[in-house]
Every structure is written in structure tokens, then in C-alpha cells.
Amino acid sequence: MVASSWPGVDPEWSRSINVISTSAVDAPGTTRRWHILDNGAQLARRGLTPTGTLLCVHGNPTWSYLWRTLLSAGSKAAHPWRVVAVDQLDMGYSERTGTFRRLQDRINDLGDLSDALDLQGPVTTVGHDWGGVISLGWALAHQEQLAGVVLTNTAVHQPPGSSIPPALQLALHPAVHRWGTTTSDAFLRVTHSLAQPPLPADVRKAYMAPYRGAQRRSGVGNFVADIPVDATHPSYPALLSVADGLRGLKVPALMMWGPKDPIFSDRYLKDLIDRLPHSDVHRFEGAGHLVAEDRDIASPLFQWLAGNEASLPSPAPLPSHNPQTPGGSGTRQFRPFWDSVEVLATGAAGGETAVAEMGPDGTVSRSLSWHQLHRNILDLEAGLRDLGVGKGSRVSLMVPPGVDLTVTLYACLRLGAVVVVADAGLGTKGLSRAVKGATADFIIGIDKALLAASLLGWPGRRISVRDLPAIRRRMLGVENSLDALTRRGSAQPTAVPSDASDPDAPAAVLFTSGSTGPAKGVLYTHRQLTAMRDTVAGTFGIKEGSRLVAGFAPFALLGPALGAVSVTPDMDVTAPRTLTAQALADAVTAIEATVVFAAPAALHNVVATGHALDETGRAALSRVSLLLSAGAPVPEPLLAKVRTLLPGASLHTPYGMTEALPVTDISLEEIQEAEAEAASGSVPGAGNGVCVGTPVQGARLAIIPLEADGRASGSSPVTSHGITGEILVSAPHVKDSYDRLWLTQQESVNPAGWHRTGDVGHFDAVGRLWVEGRLAHVVTAPGAVVTPVGAEQAIERLDSVRLAAIVGVGPTGTQAVAAVVETVPPVRTAGPATPQLAGHVRRAALDAGVQVSAVLAVPAQPTDVRHNAKIDRARLARWAARVLAGGRPGTP
């Protein structure tokens, strides 16, 4: 045992200790030798008083080396904690006892060690794999010393009727078990191969070192054999005791999870959250079983500890947003999201159309009156309640916008269920990642979605929209349908009052577009959903009786809450560019709509297909009085073209995001005025970005200034004009949190009371906000920080350019600025631009104050699936780096 050869380990931490065993498998008075990594003596030598102790327990087949980053972080003066990382008996460099130690023995062993070390509180346990179960067993037995529990990929319960993970089934197979775990080192090598990215050779060597030779691997095999596969297993009672005991454990809890774990999948995380519902959870997308190797877990762990120090043993509350309600101060009486549906259903408008869907032939294919909508919601609510959907149930909705989705959404909200909305616009991979991460209890979907659920292993009991033939129902694993549940609910004599009585209870998880990284789940409470409704109503004057064409999914669901008659046009809502001018005109005609909401990509296609409209269609569009378009920047030239089709409409482009919609608002006339002032220089700060206007009612904005390295790491908001930085927003309708992304949430609410948007921009002298791009897309050239949008706009004014993207190539601080353009007409292959085009682009960018080093052309810019508008600049930057290094261009 040579501690100096273990990368990342200070040899001073390594020590052995003899412990008297009280385990039933040992004779009374037996002494066992333990190896531990312990920074306690080091802290004392440095004169540092630890805040508490982390008791870290590894799983199989790792050892205390797994926790070296926690030992290093805990040894620093900034947050001194004693970290004791144990090698369990028969594992690592601890004694090989020659006994078969089961789960309860190992929990007792850990208690013997903590007594020998005289560990005093506050103690926070940290566990991984089966070390997680053992650490929890210790925690339950030592609650007087316990300050918190931290878990990485582990499990405490095997759901009835489900089998253990295939990898463990194989390891337990009689033909494989002894050879795979003890005779050979196959089990170790397979486990180490789960690291994402692969372990460095020296780290892998350190993990292997204590297990060289079959005689040193007996504990590895025994650990596997001790997995309780069913209730007959000798360790099952001990596992059940730990699992049941967690429901009464009230100390702070943190779970840091690798979702790509083939052993402990998200279903085990879901079970742990159910047992410890107050837990803080962070899922590290892309990380796997060895999450402590795949990601930096030390930083979030010590940040979490610091947040809980002041209020041990109770968890510290998260920062809250501005408590102002839209349009005034104080607390307004809470009006449920579905209130307008009930009011209109029982009033004079009860027989009038509430929601409608358009068919391919240009006529209404389906509709419900307000009374029918309300009745269907109540009936489905009753049917879902009978099925087991209730307060806190997670229900994933895989139904296109329209009548069925509207009824289902409102029924679930009334039940107090949490609706999970991750649309197909995320793409198959992104959608699957989102659905698995949300771990829904139920999936309600069309056949295509249910087939994907079967093929991709999405969690949740499955409910179809329509009644299905028995064979197809079995094939898709469907146990019921919305039609059948509605019929069941309608047979019940009286409606049950809504279960959603708590305004601050979770209501919905809405996923971001994933255009700048993996899509994030955004959690809203009922109060925040209603605040969004009231903000939209107050800002745009949409009230009961308004008539709305919802060409963008969020507004299809918001319409009934506003009391607006809503129609979904004939289009693929997951691909906004499929909306045609004729389909829009047909939808407007169907309900005599005065309000239209459509994404920028949809407007592009509406303009492109406007020539096909007949006089009736043009007349219908001329009666629209308000157009809203959001989801991505809407260029002024596009809005000007839209004006020719909707001459009577006030054209507005609210700025917002999934976490806060809307944040600001601006009209076409105001955009034109702002751009004229930018061109003339008459208003200081005007220009260099997209003007998105002023805050909507109830919202506040501020800026965290950019630093020379392109970051916005400060915490002091400013509102002065002309300062570029990350945009902050505070409003009653800002999200509650990121779902199961604790670290991301903490980063997003610094300073407290604000949401960091991830966008960069500045104010002008009259208080308007100009958005300059995403923080992640800022280019750090030598001596300059370049935000992309201003130069992109200048380049897009060229007749030969349709879309432009500014990206950085090279190391931070010395990046070359590259412009990637989609040309008109499109180039046939991607690669360096022609000298003539490159010259035009460079001159245009220079007029905007940006010196471009390289110009590349592509047939089409890579855009996000949901909006068909947000350019994937990170992807373009990687492609540009390859091309400029002499690689084959290929497709970006």
C-alpha cells in the first residue's frame, strides 16, 4: 500500500485503525483492521476547525479513493470539513476477514468504526452504490449525530414485479458469478468502463490496485451475492428496514445522479425522492454510474453544505422571487388557472365555442363549447382520480395541441397532478432524455408517443387517447384510454372539488428547447402559472371573449385560462415552419379570430406562401388586430412583410423564455423607432442587438456586467444604460426552480430574487433592452469581448445572406472571429466563402464594430427543432474550427 502512488490523494490522509467488531459474524472481542482516508489530522495541523464531518462510504467494487475530491475540497480553509472515507471490510486496503458479511453486518461494522473514531456531530453521510444503502443504515441508527445525507447513484428498494438490472443479473448467474467477480477482475474492469469519459490510465490503475489477486477479491463477489433479488433473500429485511426508515428522516438530503447508469437508473432516483421528498436533486446529464469520476461533485456538495450550515438540521429555503403580483403591489386573491373555464361554462357564453381544431380541408374538424369543455374536464378528472392520478402525480402529456390536450391538461391541474410537457420538437434523443429524467408516473399519449415509450423504455403507466384494439393495447402496454376514463367519470353522480388547493404546490414541468444544451425541466407552481396568465392578459389586453389562433403550443394551452376562444390551425406544431398563409386564414375565419400567436419560423412560411391566398383569405387576415410572435428574435424586415398580410394588426414580439414568459414587449413601430435612433445615434446605448422593448407589467430587469473573459460572475445588478452583461429578470411568473437540477438552480438565482437568463444585452438611455446573444456564445477575441447579434444583423442586411452566425474559434481570450453565413441562393456545399462574399461580409461586420477573421458558407444553418429559428452556434463553432484547421468540411 503506497498512498503516494494514488493520483489526487495526499499521503497524509491514509491511515489504518484497529476496531473491535460487534458483528454477529465475528467472535466477541474480534479486532478488525480498517483502512481509511481521513483529513482530520491535516486540518488540526493547519489550525482549521471543521464545520462537521463527512462520512463517505464507497460501493462495489470501488474503495475510499472514490472520494478523493471531497477530501481535497474539505481540507481547504474556505470550507473546512473533516472527511472520513472508509474502505469497507474485505474491500480496498482494509482487512480480508474471511467471512461473508451481509448488509446488516456492514451497517454494524460502520457503526463500530465511527465509535472507534469517536465521530461527533454534525455528521453528513455520503454514499454510492451499495455504500449508499450502508451509509443510510448508519444514518438511521445515529440520528442524534446526523446533519444530512448525500447520495450518488444507489438504490434502497426493488419495485415489486420488476427485475434487478441486467448487469447485476449477469453477475449473479451461477455460471458467471464466481469467475466474473472473484477469479477474474472482469467485474472491476466492466465497472470502471462505465466512466464518462473513460478513466485516465493512472486513475484506473489506482482503482485496481487493492484487488490484485483472487484472494483479495472475495469481498467483491460477496457484495454481489448479497444483493436482495427478492423477499426470500437473507438481506431483504435489512434493506426493507432502511427503505422504510427513510420516510421518517427529516434532515437535509442531496442526491447527485448520473442518468446514464445502466445499473441504478432514474427509477431508483424516483423511489428515493418519494421517500425523501424534501431532497435537493441534481442530475448531471451525460454522467453515468461513477458520477463522482464523471463530474465535479465536490463543488456542489460543499456549496450545499454551506447553504445548510446556518439552519441545521432543517434545510435552508431557496431564494424567492419578487413577491409582487402583476399590475400592483401586495398579494392578490389567488384565482385558479382553470377559473375562466368554469365561469364561462356556467354563464351566458356556455354554449359558444371554446376550443377548436382545424382539419386539412380548411374546416373545423372538432370543437367543444365552454359547457362541454368544462364537463369533459370534470369527467376526465374523475376517471383519472379513479385510476390513481392524484396530488403530486407526474403525468407526461404526449398529445398534440387541441381539444384532447386542453381537456387533459386542465383535468390534471385540477387533480393537483404535475403535468410534464416535453414536446416532440426536442427530437427523439432530447425528448427521451427529458421524459426519462422527469420519471413520470403516467404517460398520456397518441399511438406514436406510446410506441416510442415502449421502444425507448420511458417510465410511467400508459394511457392512450382513443380506445385501442386489444392487440394494439397489449403491444403498447396501454392500460386505459382517455375516452374510457371520461366515460367512467361521467357515470359518477357528483363532481369532486379540485385537489389543487395549494397555490404554491408544483403544477407543471415545462422543458426548454434544448437549443443551448440539454433541455432543462422548468418547474412552475400553480401561483406562477396563474401569474403568467395574468401577465399575458394585462400586457396584451387578451380577456374573456377574445378569439385566438394558437400557432405555438404554449398559447394553445393558455387560451382557455385567459377565457379566450382558441383554435389550433392545420400544421405540425412541432415544426412551426409548416404553418401556411392559407391554414392561418382558415383558422382565423373559423372563429373570427382577432389575435394570432405564431413562432418566427411560422411567420417566414406564412409570408412565403402568402401569394396563394384568395380574396377571402386576405380579407380574413385583415381583420386580425393583434399578432404575437416569440421564441426567437423576429427581424424587422420579416415583420414588415407580415404587415402586408395583416394590415390591421398591431405586431408585437414579446421577449421571454420557458423560465419566464413574457419578460418584455415591443411593437413593430417601436422597433422601427429604436432602429432609427440607433442609426442616427440620437439615443445613447441604442443599437448593437435586437431591441426587445421594456418590461411587461410586474417584471423588473437588470444586468450583471460582462468581464474581460466573457463571463458574468458578479452578483451586483446594474440598470445603467450602455453596459453589456447577463440579463436578469424578477417577476411573479418566473419559474419556481429547475427540476432535479439543484446546482443549475442555485447558479440561476444569484443574486437572490433574480433569475439569470443566460442572455446578454444592455439598456439604452430610455430604458429599452437590447439583446446581444447568449452568454455561452460570447466570443473572447484578443483584447475584446464580442457579442454576436449586432454583427450578425449587419451581415444579414446583405442581399446575398439569409442568416448569419458569429462564432469564436480557438482558446478563450485569443479566439478568432468567424462568420458563418447561409446564402441566397444557397451554396451547394459547405466550406470557405468565395473571396467576393467574404469581402462583403467582413465590411458589413466591421461597420458593426467587429473584425471577422474567417468567412464560411453553409447551405442551411443548423437550427433548433422546436423553433426552427435558433442557430446552434456551438455546433457551428466546432465545425468552423475543424474546417479552419484543414479538415474536410462535411455538414455542420
Image (cartoon, helix red, strand yellow):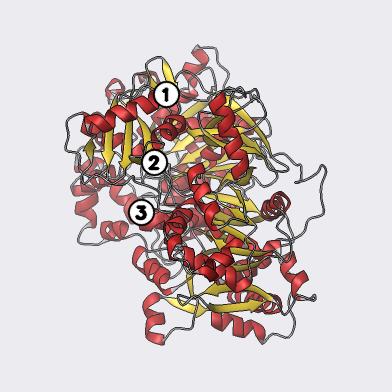
Verify CB contact (< 8 Å) between mark 3 and mark 1: no
Count of numbered tags: 3
Q: Earlier in the sequence, mark 3 or mark 2?
A: 3
Q: Quadrant of the C terminus?
A: top left
The circle on residue 263 is 3
Instruction: Please say if 814 is above or below 505.
Output: above
Q: Nearer the viewer, mark 3 or mark 1?
A: 1
Residue type at mark 2 is: Val
How far apart marks 3 and 1 lie (CA) works out to 56 Å
Along the line of sight, the residue nearer the viewer: 7 or 746: 746
Residue at coordinates 69% horizontally, 34% vertically from top-left? 311
Q: Is residue 201 visible?
A: no
Q: Which residue is mark 1?
A: 847
Along the line of sight, the residue nearer the viewer: 48 or 507: 507
Q: Earlier in the sequence, mark 3 or mark 1?
A: 3
Residue type at mark 1 is: Asp
Give coordinates of residue 451: x percent, y percent: 37, 71
Q: In what element is the residue under mark 2?
A: helix
Along the line of sight, the residue nearer the viewer: 728 or 88: 728
Give coordinates of residue 192: x percent, y percent: 27, 42
Q: In what element is the residue under mark 1?
A: helix
Instruction: Please say if 585 is above or below 90.
Output: below
How far apart marks 1 and 2 lie (CA) works out to 48 Å
Residue at coordinates 70% horizontally, 45% vertically from top-left? 732
How far apart marks 3 and 2 lie (CA) works out to 12 Å
Q: Which residue is mark 2?
A: 291
